[in-house]
Structure formats: C-alpha cells, structure tokens
Amino acid sequence: MSEEVQAESSSQRLDVKKLLKSVLAFKSSDLHLVVGSEPQIRIDKELRALNLPVLTAKDVEEMAYSLIEDKQKKIFEEKNELDFSFELKDIGRFRANFYKTIYGIGCAFRMIPIEIPTLDEYGNPPIFKELIKKEKGLILVTGPTGSGKSTTLASMLHEINMTERRHIITIEDPVEFVHKNIKSLFSQRDVGNNTASFATALKYSLRQDPDIILIGEMRDAETIGAALTAAETGHLVFGTLHTNSAPGTINRIIDVFDGEEQAQIRAQLASSLVAVVSQTLIPRVGGGKVATQEILITNPAVQNQIREDKVHQIYSQMQLNQQETNMTTQTQQLVELLQKKVISKENAIKNSNRPDELLKMIGAL
C-alpha cells in the first residue's frame, strides 16, 4: 500500500462524517485530524495519509465542533481535553478524543464495531467461556492502547448476555460498545456524564444489585481498592490496565499502593484474582491483525506467590502443566504463530515482552 490513501474526493475534505466513513471503507481502526497534516488513518498499526489537502486550524476546529454540543465545547475549552463516544447513522460508532496542540485542535477517533463479536468469532480460546461462568472474582484484560482490550471484554459480556440472566453494570470513560439486553440487563454509565468518577460509580454500584461490574480503566488506588472489595464481596468484576504481561499486571496493582498497604492488597489480590489476559495485536502476513493473549489463571500456587510477594516466580508457574491449567505465555503464542507463518519474525520480535527468550525458542524459524 502506498504512503497515501485515495479519499473519495478533495471537495469532501471538510466533511468529518465522510472522513469517518473512510475509516470503515479502508477497514482502518483510527482517524487523526492534526493541523499541518493531511487527515490520516491507521491500517494494521501503521498511519496512512488520505489523499487530501493539509488541514488548517480552522478546518479542524469546524470539524471538531460539528460533532459536539455546547456543554461539551465548554468543557473542552476549559480543560483542553475531551473524551466522548458517539454514533453516526449508517456509518458506525466511534470513541473520540479532542486535545489542544501548539497549532490548534487535534482529534483522534477510534472505530467501535456496532455488532459485538462473540468469543468464537473473535477467535478467543475456550477457557474464556469457563472464566465468565465464575460467580465472583476479578478478571483483568491488559495491554497497550489499541491492543483490542475493549473488544475482548465486550465479547465476554456479550457471551454472558446470550446465556445468563445477570445485571451487568459498566463504568467507562467513555462508553464504547453499547450492549442490547438479550438475557442480561445492562446499566451502562459514562464517567463525566452519568457519574463523577470510576471510584464514585463503584462505591454506589454495590447498592444497585449488580452481578457483574465492568471497570473501563483501573487508574488509581481508590478505584483498584474498590474493585478488589467488589470482587471479594460476591461480584464478578472485569477491569483493564495498560500493562504488557500477566505478572507485570500484578506488580502494577501492588505498586499503586503505599508500602504499608501492600501486604493487605497482596492478600486481597491473592483471594480475589481469577485471571489476567495480557493482549497484543500484531500485523498478519498479508494484511490484518492477530491477537496474542498471555493467560494467567490463578491456582493455589499462584495465590501463594502473590501473598508471599514472590510475583517473579509466577512466570515459571505459568509454564507448568499448561494442558491442565489452561495458562500460556506470550512467547509460546508468538512461536505458534511463526510456525503457522501467520506473522513475520520481525513483528514477533518487535512485539515480544521477552525477545531473548523468543529468539532462543524460534531458532532457525
């Protein structure tokens, strides 16, 4: 594919809805509007410029403000940042972030599928269907921005929705996937619009008779502490963090707290953590992306390692008796994808959490 992507026509360059339609047309994930550049879309993790004129500050401002209400405009002008989501009829659903740069407004749009994929359609391993049957505990899906965390979680909740009669509360900033009530009942809350903060929403959610709670992002000690309490008190809690490995996720949670609190947090985490899925999206050979998912399932040995502050030993535990535990490491998944020639060696190494280990395992592949 060339550096530039041909858009419908230059006369449509100021119509943000038609630019967003290009995201669908080119099967891309994101649209970027930045002063001094052509509009750009992301395809298979790489940015490509649309074949349109360079945007001026006025161009971007007009397009940005055409999508928001006066209340949102006021918030943006006061804080210089704005997160929101929206749906355009016959086009799709998007998550948006507006921000200020030295030259004017910048906009980033992420495509959100309206139709939520099932776990099977998304290619997730069978263990996921077992995890979502848990009555209580904490399930974390982690990974860098753009790694498909939201889609994986949406697929899990969709599977529950098709099979169980549960009350599911989602707390997000902003709400991304919109679920329709099938068997389950959804209460979806947008931080900033429907509630003051993640921590506040979590506090009151326990009075709203939930069976399952989704926390869009576990950002701080207050939110993480409330999530652990909810998981301990008979609720199934799903959450996300921006971490790159399953053991690294546990360390991140513990490190958020002060030293004197860490022993208690380790004890709570040991008793409530069900699983950590650490996810990365990697370009496929020939186009598209494939997910690698490092999976940690807690068992008595893992619980003891968390409780005794021996998190560094968990990775070795993940490599033992995997047919019985359903655990897997990212390195093993990368090797399998390389053997099937799904991904390139270059992309495998670039996305590996343990490149030295990977190089030893792939040998002459």
Image (tube, rainbow, N blue to C red):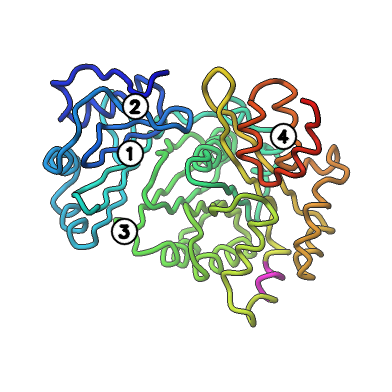
Q: Amino acid at mark 2?
A: Val
Q: Which residues are magenta?
A: 264-268
Q: Residues within 10 Å of mark 4 (few under 14, many from 20)?
A: some
Residue 179 higher or lower than 122, as above or below: below
Residue 337 higher or lower than 211, as above or below: above
What element does badge 2 sit on?
helix
Q: Which mark is residue 192?
A: 3
Compare marks 2 and 3 and give the one earlier in the sequence: 2
Q: Which mark is residue 23?
A: 2
The residue that label 1 is drawn on is 109
Between marks 3 and 1, how big is the CA–CA gap? 19 Å
Image spot of residue 86 (x, y percent): 29, 39
What element does badge 1 sit on?
strand
The residue that label 4 is drawn on is 333
Between marks 4 and 3, how big is the CA–CA gap? 38 Å
36 with respect to 330 (left or right) = left
Residue pictured at 69% horizontal, 50% vertical? 275
